[in-house]
Image: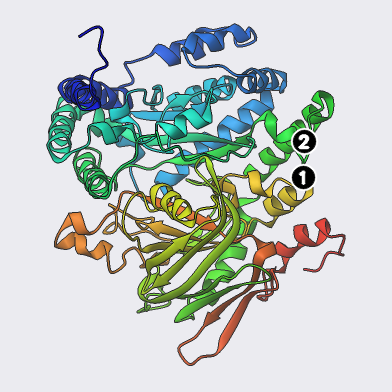
């Protein structure tokens, strides 16, 4: 045997049984890592180390690149009050999320922090803040075992990948062992694991996430040697994800938890627009972008709340919204809205300021699928770790009917990337969200530094209209009433797909929600169209034209050297 090469089938068989036999350990421990604050390995490093001695980073056991070292060094250079402001904004956003959604945080006792290594000084301050709220902190490494990984997404703490192509090549290693018998076993193990840790799961309040942006763009290469799911496995994977979500919701009800997400740049963003690198100038550029990001994350809550309510009042008069791109942007969409009963008490759009998604700046709704149709197009957009080029989607009655991108010469490879990374291997998805971003300050900053294509969707979604495919923003909590600051109930919490939960949960959810934004520069018009065909213009030629919201144009006009015009 030692002198022969074993056939591929026998190697796959060995791997299959290894993953299957041991998943009662690997999956169970992964569930514990996500809900049990008694696992303190990373927390002890953060709280007990001298963070000025950067050698502490190597204690995490992850690959530590120059980026993590530079971020940690930069964090150590910041005044204590700046670091505390960053942490306060982050943890207060988490607390506000529970308040806005009418959920009782006092019933919970643990929060999970997810972040990229290097930000330990901020995380340390956040741990203290959460402790004052009565929350212990969970910190777990992003999944290492294939059985626990999710393609294109890391959950936990992590460092910069040593080789992004390697991670791309191995994102579907589950193809080696994924079959019906395995998914049934994993689902069974998942339920047993949650039953074992149901006390910890019940106390879990939800994640608090720190994202990063500014990394050099990654252009993946599709290699024939890499594992990939076949059509049968794609459907099986999507079905298994839905089943896992149902089990998780039994032990961690979605209408009892919340979250928050905030983002900061990494040093790579200091590179020039053509990728050139001069350490001194790059460091200064990074510092300025970081400072402006802090400012964007702490914009005036009350001012935006008032402006956004003006936009919502106009949108609530509409039967549908029409969105059109300009220039090379081919977007031409009609988004249907739910019919309001009592407009004095009901609204379609949520007035979103700085709580679960930081920075502030959007109004959003769950569209009515029937009548929602047309083409969504964007020149470049980051989704996860991938920058999509000329991304296009066509909708009919709110469902995706066609899609493409220009990331590869072969259009079939482009469609495959969209299906894997955006549709999450579903054949189609509904438009789960329509929103209008109002954070023109962030957009002006991005234009000033030429970093629009490097910003994460968390910030980009506040910089123009955006559309999410997949579940609504209210998935697993549709029956919980949600109110805007003015007291009106947001009634657009369901669509024609999610309402199926009342008959069959497996038909109601997709376990994904992916945002796609059109930047102001590619936007022509957004019109609210009443039932009689009359129009209210919200945006024209990329500028806000609705009376009462002209202040949103000030950052854009300043960037272009125009006088203030409120």
Q: Which residue occupies 44% across, 45% down?
A: 97
Q: Position of residue 88 (x, y in %)?
A: 57, 33
Q: In this view, does 395 lie above or below 451?
A: below
Of badges 1 and 2, nearer the viewer stands 1
Observer-nearest of 60 and 338: 60
Mark number displayed over residue 222: none
Q: Which residue occupies 40% across, 69% down?
A: 367
Q: Is residue 331 above or below residue 468?
A: below
Q: Position of residue 444 (x, y in %)?
A: 74, 53
Q: Going by the picture, which residue comes out furthest to the bottom?
A: 532
Please tell me whether mark 1 sits on a helix, a strand or a loop. Answer: helix
| Residue 341 visible to an observer of this rendering | yes
Label 1 crowd bin: few (<14), some (14–19), many (20+), radius 10 Å: some
User: Would you name the residue on which mark 2 appears?
Assistant: 288
Mark number displayed over residue 449: 1
Q: In this view, does 352 lie above or below 183?
A: below
Q: Which residue occupies 24% across, 65% down?
A: 499
Q: In the image, is 441 to the left or to the right of 388?
A: right
Q: Where is residue 69 in the image (x, y as percent from the top left)?
A: 64, 17
Which is more N-terminal, label 2 or label 1?
2
């Amino acid at each position: 045997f030692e002198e022969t090469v074993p056939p591929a089938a026998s190697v796959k068989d060995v791997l299959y049984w290894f993953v299957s036999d041991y998943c009662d350990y690997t999956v169970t421990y992964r569930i514990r890592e996500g809900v049990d604050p008694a696992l303190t390995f990373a927390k002890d490093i953060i709280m007990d180390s001298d963070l000025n001695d950067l050698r502490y980073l190597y204690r995490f056991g992850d690959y530590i690149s120059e980026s993590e070292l530079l971020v940690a060094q930069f964090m150590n250079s910041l005044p204590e009050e700046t670091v505390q402001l960053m942490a306060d904004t982050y943890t207060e956003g988490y607390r506000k999320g529970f308040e806005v959604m009418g959920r009782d945080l006092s019933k919970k006792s643990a929060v999970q922090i997810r972040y990229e290594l290097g930000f330990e000084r901020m995380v340390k301050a956040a741990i203290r803040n959460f402790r004052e709220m009565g929350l212990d902190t969970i910190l777990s490494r992003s999944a290492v075992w294939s059985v626990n990984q999710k393609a294109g997404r890391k959950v936990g703490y992590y460092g910069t990948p040593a080789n992004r192509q390697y991670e791309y090549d191995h994102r579907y290693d589950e193809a080696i062992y994924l079959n019906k018998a395995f998914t049934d076993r994993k689902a069974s193990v998942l339920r047993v694991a949650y039953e074992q840790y149901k006390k910890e799961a019940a106390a879990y309040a939800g994640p608090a996430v720190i994202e990063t942006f500014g990394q050099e763009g990654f252009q993946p290469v599709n290699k024939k040697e890499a594992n990939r799911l076949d059509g049968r496995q794609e459907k099986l994977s999507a079905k298994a994800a839905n089943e896992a979500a149902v089990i998780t919701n039994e032990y961690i009800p979605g209408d009892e938890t919340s979250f928050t997400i905030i983002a900061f740049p990494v040093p790579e963003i200091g590179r020039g627009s053509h990728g050139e690198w001069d350490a001194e100038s790059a460091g200064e550029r990074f510092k300025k972008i970081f400072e402006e990001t802090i400012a964007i994350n702490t914009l005036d809550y009350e001012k935006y709340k008032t402006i956004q309510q003006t936009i919502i009042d106009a949108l609530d008069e509409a039967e549908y919204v029409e969105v059109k791109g300009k220039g090379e942007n081919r977007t031409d969409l009609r988004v249907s809205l739910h019919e309001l009963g009592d407009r004095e008490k009901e609204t379609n759009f949520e007035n979103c300021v700085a709580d679960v998604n930081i920075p502030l700046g959007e109004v959003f709704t769950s569209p009515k699928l029937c009548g929602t149709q047309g083409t969504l197009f964007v020149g470049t957009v980051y989704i996860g770790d991938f920058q999509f080029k000329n991304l296009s989607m066509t909708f009919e009655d709110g469902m995706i009917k066609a899609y493409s991108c220009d990331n590869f010469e072969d259009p079939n490879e482009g469609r495959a990337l969209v299906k894997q990374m955006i549709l999450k291997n579903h054949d189609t998805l509904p438009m789960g969200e329509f929103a209008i971003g109002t954070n023109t300050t962030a957009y002006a900053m991005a234009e000033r530094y030429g970093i629009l294509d490097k910003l994460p969707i968390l910030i980009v979604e506040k910089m123009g209209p955006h559309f999410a495919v997949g579940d609504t923003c209210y998935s697993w909590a549709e029956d919980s009433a949600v109110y805007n600051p003015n007291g009106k109930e947001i009634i657009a919490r369901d669509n024609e797909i999610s309402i199926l939960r009342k008959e069959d949960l497996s038909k109601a959810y997709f376990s994904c929600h992916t945002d796609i934004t059109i930047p102001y520069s590619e936007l022509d018009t957004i019109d609210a169209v009443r039932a009689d065909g009359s129009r209210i213009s919200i945006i024209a030629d990329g500028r806000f034209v609705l009376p009462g919201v002209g202040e949103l144009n000030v950052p854009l006009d300043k960037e272009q050297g125009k006088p203030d015009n409120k």
